[in-house]
Each structure stands twice: as structure tokens, then as C-alpha cells.
């Protein structure tokens, strides 16, 4: 994936110019979680503002708590 620096322009197929106003950096807040019910592994944001549920069975994996969320599943690794 290619990230653009702030202010750098790029021409698309329709010849329109697009500007990127920020660069996405990984902060270590993304984690791979194993669901306690179905053992599905998925990536979630540790500081989630809303409840994160399993994509397979729908059980709650992360409950928001105003800062770092309460993680219900097993943390396998830090992704970001």
C-alpha cells in the first residue's frame, strides 16, 4: 500500500487531483484476538470506542472503557 505525504498530489484515472491530509502510522494499538467461544482469530483496536464482536459467532471481544478497552478474548500478538 502506498501512502502519500502531506500535501503531495496524485493524479487518478479520471485526471482529478487528490490530496492526502495525513499519513497513517501504526501505533501498536492493533491486536490479534482469539475468540473464547469459537476460536476465531481477528484483528481489533485496543482503544475501541464501540463494542467489538466476533465476525463468526457474534460474542463480545472488546468492551470500551474510556481508554484501553477490556479484552474478553486471548491476545495472540500485537499487530501494529
Image (cartoon, grey):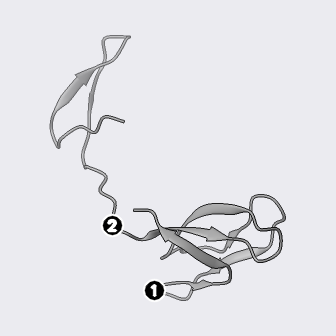
Horizontal placement of 49 versus 57: left or right?
left
Figure label count: 2
Dot 2: element: loop
Q: Is residue 63 above or below residue 35?
A: below
Residue drawn at x 23%, y 37% as measured from the top left: 4
Q: Is residue 45 above or below residue 22?
A: below
Residue drawn at x 39%, y 62% as measured from the top left: 80
Position of the N terminus, as image quadrant, is: top left
Q: Is residue 67 above or below residue 23?
A: below
- State which tag comes first along the sequence, 1 or 2: 2
Instruction: Find the residue positioned furthest to the left.
Output: 7
Residue drawn at x 30%, y 34% as measured from the top left: 2
How far is mark 1 from mark 2, CA to CA?
Answer: 15 Å
Q: Position of residue 39 (x, y in %)?
A: 77, 68
Name the mark on residue 27.
2
- The quadrant where residue 10 appears: top left
Residue occupied by mark 1: 67
Horizontal placement of 59 versus 63: left or right?
right
Amino acid at each position: 500500500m502506498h501512502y502519500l505525504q502531506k500535501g503531495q498530489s496524485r493524479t487518478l484515472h479520471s485526471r482529478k487531483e487528490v490530496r492526502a491530509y495525513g499519513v497513517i502510522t501504526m501505533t501498536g494499538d492493533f491486536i490479534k484476538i482469539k475468540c473464547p467461544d469459537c476460536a476465531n482469530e481477528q484483528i481489533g483496536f485496543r482503544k475501541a470506542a464501540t463494542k467489538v464482536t466476533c465476525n463468526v459467532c457474534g460474542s463480545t471481544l472488546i468492551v470500551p472503557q474510556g481508554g484501553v478497552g477490556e479484552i474478553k478474548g486471548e491476545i495472540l500478538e500485537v499487530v501494529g
